[in-house]
Amino acid sequence: MNVTGQSYDYFRPWQKKAPFSKRALGAVLSKGRVLVTADLVANQNFVELERAESGEKTAANVQVIDYEANLALLEPTEKTFLDGITPLEITPDTVVGDRLAAWQLEPTGALLATEGLVTTIQMMPYPIDVGQFLTYRVSIPMQYRENSYTVPLVKNNKLAGLLLRYDSRSQLLDAIPAPIINHFLKEAESQKYRGFPFAGFSFFPTRDPELRAYAGEKGKSGGVYISNVEPGTPAMKAGMQVGDVVTSVGDHAIDQNGNYVDPLYGKIEFTNLLTAHAYAGDTVPFHIERNGKPMQLNVTLEHRDTKDYVSPPYNLDQPPRYFVVGGLIFQELSRQYLKEWGLNWQREAPQRFVYMDHFQSELFPDRNRRVVILSQVLPANSTIGYDDLAYLTVTKVNGKEIKSLEDLAEVVKHPIEGFIKIETEEDPKQIELDASQVASEAHELQENYGISSLQRLQ
């Protein structure tokens, strides 16, 4: 796999960053498809397949991509390109103690196979950090190359997983396991890919006897305590409430740590039943106790689309939205924007924005809005005195509440007594721009800063 692409620049949202190139090893599957990680083809401009043995190349298209599960399916534009390559079968029966081989390519094109031991199988966050998914952890002395965006893990010449991340110091590898891959492939067969399901609640273990007594579970042993139910989610629609104790999901009893007994893995967190075993649209019976009394809730699972978040968790393959008014750059808060501060964004980015992103469900329970921010100011005649302003939360413009960039774009068309009045949550609380000066300087602003368009709302 050879990939070239460009990421979007959220600090200069009208332009892209420098081009990048990535190289990886894809897993050839049946029906002329190639499985890779979504990381590999994020923000791609061109994807090329290359046969290792001959160097023959052809372009490829991304057929389906799921950033949350970090998986993508490609197909060559030349349908016969993969002829002669035996597709990998998928083996979903890996357990702790099995040995897996990581397949990589030497610069010469020769196959390098490194063996490792599966040490744990557990639920873990994936790079996008939306929910948790089943993960294999493998102890392996791999020669990890920086461009190893897709490394197949193989057991008995069958695909067991794909590399998720690798720590060369501890020599521990996390892998996307075959059950998640199979779920992705089955969903990819449908006409409209829906993604992995979610329910929309948080929970605590019930090891604390006082918590059990508070929840009406004194003298009982299993179950987890529901600590939060997000508005508008499948759990809330089914009637789940804070304080409920979930004792089983389907036929699987849940212990006080939130684990069920899986026939393959033994004890593992029950959320695996919702992500790896269920699909969007499935109705899953939850057996709960409310104030000590047993009940059943039927939860119809859904996939939560990025547009259903106040601060979307990712925005890839799409340009950022923005609106420029007289040198003031307005954007909508998103985790993609916060990640411009680097791997340590949770500490380095403006803390009020990190807080809003993290607690968006509690802060904005209705979810029917975005958070509009003044991200920075380009020096111009109309912004004299405002040059140092940045990272402010916009509440109102011209007296009207702002819940999206569309709101902002509409309201600035109607100045009050010749001025655009912008109110912010933080100091200076109010910014005033001369509307006629903003209009007359718009073209000059574009010329000076190389801005192709002063807005992108689509």
Image (cartoon, rainbow, N blue to C red):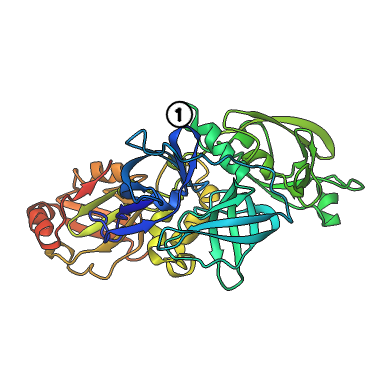
Name of the residue lying farthest toward the right: 219
Q: Is residue 324 left or right of residue 98?
A: left
Q: In this view of the protein, which residue sits in the foreground, 458 or 326?
A: 458
| Viewer can see residue 396 | yes
Q: Is residue 274 left or right of residue 394?
A: right
Quadrant including the C terminus: top left
Which amino acid does the dot numbered 1 rest on? Answer: Lys
Name of the residue lying farthest toward the top: 191
User: What residue sits 47% from the left and 68% below the top?
Assistant: 344
Spot occupied by residue 209 in the image (x, y as percentages of width and height): 86, 55
Label tally: 1
Spot occupied by residue 324 in the image (x, y as percentages of width and height): 21, 53
Spot occupied by residue 260 in the image (x, y as percentages of width and height): 78, 45
- On the image, which quarter does residue 348 sit in? bottom left
Q: In this view of the protein, which residue sits in the foreground, 232 or 253?
A: 253
Spot occupied by residue 334 in the image (x, y as percentages of width and height): 41, 53
Figure check: 420 above or below 178 = below
Q: Mark 1 falls on what kind of element?
A: loop
> Mark 1 packing: few (<14 Cα in 10 Å), some, or many (20+)?
few
User: What residue sits 10% from the left and 52% below the top?
Assistant: 436
Name of the residue lying farthest toward the bottom: 169
Figure check: 225 above or below 207 = above
Q: In this view of the protein, which residue sits in the foreground, 389 or 106?
A: 106
Q: Is residue 437 left or right of residue 61?
A: left
Q: Is residue 294 left or right of residue 399?
A: right
- On the image, which quarter does residue 244 sit in? top right
Q: Which residue is mark 1?
A: 192
User: What residue sits 27% from the left and 43% below the top?
Assistant: 457
